Image: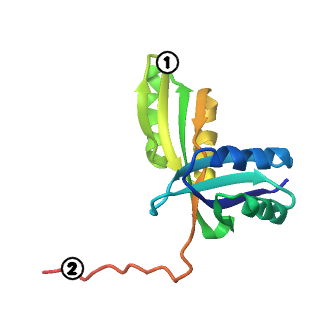
Amino acid sequence: MTHHTLSVIVEDKPGVLARVSAMCSNRGFNIHSLAVGPTHMAGRSHITMVVDAPEVEQLKKQLHKLVNVIKVQELDTGRALETEVMMVRVSCEPAQRGELGGTADLFGARMVDLTSNTIAFEISGTPGHLGDFLDQVRPYGIVDLVKSGRIAMKQRSEKPLTLTPTASRT
């Protein structure tokens, strides 16, 4: 089944998230990831949902029918800015710390806990980036893993600025 990322702007009121998730559940749509937070507008929240929905148009129509839903938009994976946060605890003998630390540095992971036989890392990035990091540390043995829900926003439609190096000053 295909994963779809939906950006839903809602009124920041009690029960809105419960109604959104209940509507998905009642109609047989599986929520793979869910993250909610405030927006730049007072009284508004942004819900990012990653759902398994064979008919995403039907889901969008149903969401629009909910009273406190203001806007529903599907985000194209190739045209959206997406990120997640993950913490992973990995088995690690003292002799392996340098090697594992080097791998973490390459991926921008930060060590957040160290015991005699494990290291816990925090890392953020795209789902693919986190998956690549997991592939590298999996041979050591993953002891524990938690991930946040995905957050995403539409990429701006204007052409991105190209930064050029400035001339050196002498």
Image location (x, y in percent) of residue 50: 70, 53
At x 72%, y 57%, the residue is 66
The C terminus, quarter of image: bottom left
**How many numbered marks, from 0 up?**
2
Looking at the rendered structure, the kind of residue marked 2 is Ser
Question: Is residue 34 shown above or below 164?
Answer: above
Question: Is residue 58 shown above or below 91?
Answer: below
Give SS at disc 2.
Answer: loop
Q: Which residue is mark 1?
A: 117
Image location (x, y in percent) of residue 159: 52, 83
Give SS at disc 1.
Answer: loop
Label 2 vs 1, first from the N-terminus: 1
Separation of residues labelled 2 and 1 (CA atoms): 49 Å
Residue count near mark 2 (Cα–Cα under 10 Å), binned few <14, some 14–19, many ≥20: few
Image location (x, y in percent) of residue 9: 60, 61
Q: Nearer the viewer, residue 102 or 67?
A: 67
At x 38%, y 78%, the residue is 163
Numbered tag placed on residue 147 in the rendering: none
Numbered tag placed on residue 168 in the rendering: 2
For residue 112, what is the image quadrant? top left
- In the displayed structure image, the side of residue 17 where residue 41 appears, left or right: left
Residue count near mark 1 (Cα–Cα under 10 Å), binned few <14, some 14–19, many ≥20: few
- In the displayed structure image, the side of residue 165 where residue 5 appears, left or right: right
For residue 63, what is the image quadrant? bottom right
Question: Is residue 164 shown above or below 111?
Answer: below
Q: Nearer the viewer, residue 147 or 66?
A: 66
At x 71%, y 50%, the residue is 20
Looking at the rendered structure, the kind of residue marked 1 is Asn
At x 59%, y 46%, the residue is 130
